[in-house]
Amino acid sequence: MNDQELRAHQLRAVEAAKELDRICGEHQITYFLIAGSALGAVRHKGFIPWDDDIDVGMTTDQFEKLLQVAPSEIKSPYIWRHTSTDESYATLTGNIFYGEDEPLITVFPLIRMSDNKRVRKKQWLTRKVMSPVWQRKVGYHVPKDRMNAKQRLSIAGSTVLAALLPKKKVLSILRNNEKKAQGQDTEWVCNLYSKYSLEKESIRSEWLKESIRLPFEDAKLPVMKEYDAYLTHLYGDYMTPPPEKERHPVHI
């Protein structure tokens, strides 16, 4: 993908974000830009120049509200995908696509986590073990040329577990794992389906209490009011861009 194609893709994602923002506003659903999209809003007033999707997070109660309205509210040319509407879908987040095969937005449920560190680790480990099993059950495979030795080992183990467990059981384990601390007023929430570490993705629940709107391209979208604490936790010195060799799209 060249720079012109990437920019066109980014602008389609912005239009989808405006549509999601409208839907969330009409249905009183609270959400935030998270991860690289929050960083982009703060550092670039829009996309990080080499980023290729928009990351959105919301607490599980808000995510449940979105699941109720997204299938009917999100209309062509956009497509909503989630296991609640397609049990063959390989990703355990919600996603908005442009057409059939161009991912624009990932919607992450921010999962309430136990204040007990051991319980949190067990919850994270359950997700880490069972997510690849789910991918095997629905026939999703990472191309071999993109796998390292650790990933090959994970796929071998998940293939064995997938042969032993029914598909509905695997999905039930994953979804019940999200609810371990649901309804509890705990200190921690977690982007459970992130590829990063438990420590990095565990954030203070108090950071989700308030939002502010910041410019994002030609829109204004919500980020955590405590974005400085959040981005520092996630990236350290977040205002300094990474080395040039790390500046490339990762999703498309």
Image (spheres, rainbow, N blue to C red):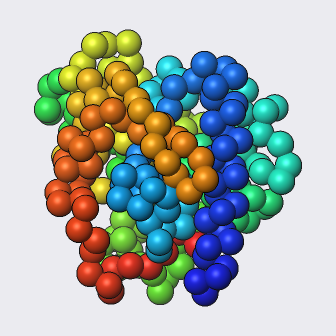
Of residues 240 and 205, the one drawn nearer to the viewer in this rendering:
240
Q: Quadrant of residue 135?
A: bottom right
| Rendered location of residue 187, percent (x, y) | 21, 23
Residue placed most toward the observer, 3 or 68: 3
Q: Nearer the viewer, residue 216 or 8?
A: 216
Q: Is residue 76 left or right of residue 176?
A: right
User: Is 221 rendered above or below residue 216?
Assistant: above
In the figure, 205 relative to 249: above or below? above
Would you place residue 238 above or below residue 210 in this image?
Answer: below
Locate residue 147, reporting x and y percent. Answer: 41, 78
Residue 123 seen from this side: no
40 shown above or below 24: below
Report the residue at 78% width, 51% height from top.
78
What residue do we see at 47% from left, 72% from top?
49
Location of residue 5 by image quarter: bottom right
For the N terminus, the quadrant is: bottom right
Q: Can you see residue 228? A: yes
Residue furthest to the left: 117
Which x, y percent locates residue 37?
A: 45, 54
Q: Residue at x 69, y 50 (%)?
A: 16
**How many numbered dots are placed on residues in this image?**
0
Residue 162 picture location, percent across and down: 51, 53
Q: Quadrant of the C terminus?
A: bottom right
| Left or right of residue 235: residue 224 | right
Rendered residue at 24%/44% (across/down): 228
